[in-house]
Amino acid sequence: MVYLLIILGVLAIGIILFINLHPTFGGSPSKQDRERNRYFDHYKNNQFVNQSPTDMKMDLSTILSLLKDSLTGKKDRSPNNPIPISLDWNKINSVEDSLTWFGHSTMLLTLDKKKILIDPMFGPSPSPVSFVGTKRYSEDLLYVIEKLPQIDVVLITHDHYDHLDYPSIIKVKDKVGHFIVPLGVAAHLIRWGINEDRITECNWWDEKQWDGLTIASVPSQHFSGRGLFNRNSTLWNGWVILGENLRIYTSGDGGYGPHFKQIGEKYGPFDLTLMEGGQYDKRWSAIHMQPEESVQAHLDVKGKNMMLIHWGAFTLAYHSWTDPVDRAIRAAKQKEVKLIAPTIGETVVLNGRFPEPNSWWKALSTKNSLEIESSTSQ
């Protein structure tokens, strides 16, 4: 018994040291940051809070149900085979207004000849260490960073691993002019070797004039944290990006709430909305939207065209991997919303003439099924 306690103690110390010393966990807001934050209405007891009360308690029954689902799960939670990626580098390098989606919430936006990278997550797994956790549906995309053009600005919505990826930041940081992030997130970037003068932090409703663009930080209903002891120590948000001719909104992660109508009143209408709508579950409905809620949020912010994000790269919930986009398309048709669904790696030219969704994910599933059936019969 004594030996067991010693082993458990050593293991606990090792885990604590790993979390404190390994750079992937990032940094912590300074004492000055915490002193600044305490004057905000959405900062209480040394933590940021949502505008609306958000119950995220994990009782025993919830933990047991999660454990059960992790063991049994639901079929089709990931593709049968890796998703192929095809990149058009001529379009990516062009100065024409466009958007390239790399899966999940990672996008390269070209607006008014500026290159804007949002939530850069190109790594193989959204976890502190790549050998633990779910794997990317496609090949590892870290190689893409080396081929990307110079990035004028990186926008981060919050510090979770599927949005702020340490390996991706390390590879991209030397080709980025500036980082604009929510309050507290600068501590992570500074620990990773990015000078403070290249980082701008934003509170909700802060508005920055940046190189001819207006970039505004707007509320979302979510949470933050990269370790065991820093939950909600940094802020989470969405971004409004206003160019000369285009108005774009990305929601970041979060549940459905009244903040969408507030954003629409202040900054709408939007030519394109990038709405979170994957990795949902009734057990965490307050902090991730169902696809039908994503479509309603698009209407709330007064969007004209919508793209569903936060799907297509990783399995983080217990629905099938295509369920988010299938449900979003149905909801969009019911509410007469124009929805686009590019393939992963596709560059969409933002000229107002968007194609109808071609259901590429269904074709991929059919192809995989035929390949498996053919190989089995041989």
Image (tube, helix red, strand yellow):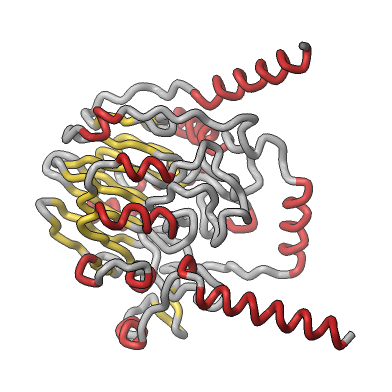
At a point 73% along the width and 64% down the height, the residue shown is: 63
Image side of residue 239 versus residue 46, left or right: left
The residue depicted at 64 percent of the width and 77 percent of the height is: 14
Estimate the x, y position of residue 247 in percent, counting from the top left: 21, 44
Instruction: Say which residue appears at 38% left-offset and 38% top-offset.
Output: 101
Pick the front one: 241 or 91: 91
Pick out the residue farthest to the right: 1
The x and y percentages for residue 329 are 48, 30
Quarter in which the C terminus is drawn:
top right
Can residue 220 be seen? yes
Residue ID at (45%, 40%): 103
- In terms of depth relative to the viewer, which is nearer, 205 or 144? 144
Percent position of residue 189, x then y = 34, 67
- Is 47 left, or right, of 370 in this rendering? left
Q: Is residue 142 above or below residue 337?
A: below
Which quarter of the picture shows residue 349? top left
Q: Nearer the viewer, residue 34 or 207?
A: 34
In this picture, is 320 found above or below 260?
A: above
**Residue 275, image x and y in percent?**
40, 45
Horizontal side of 97 relative to 309 (left or right) equals left
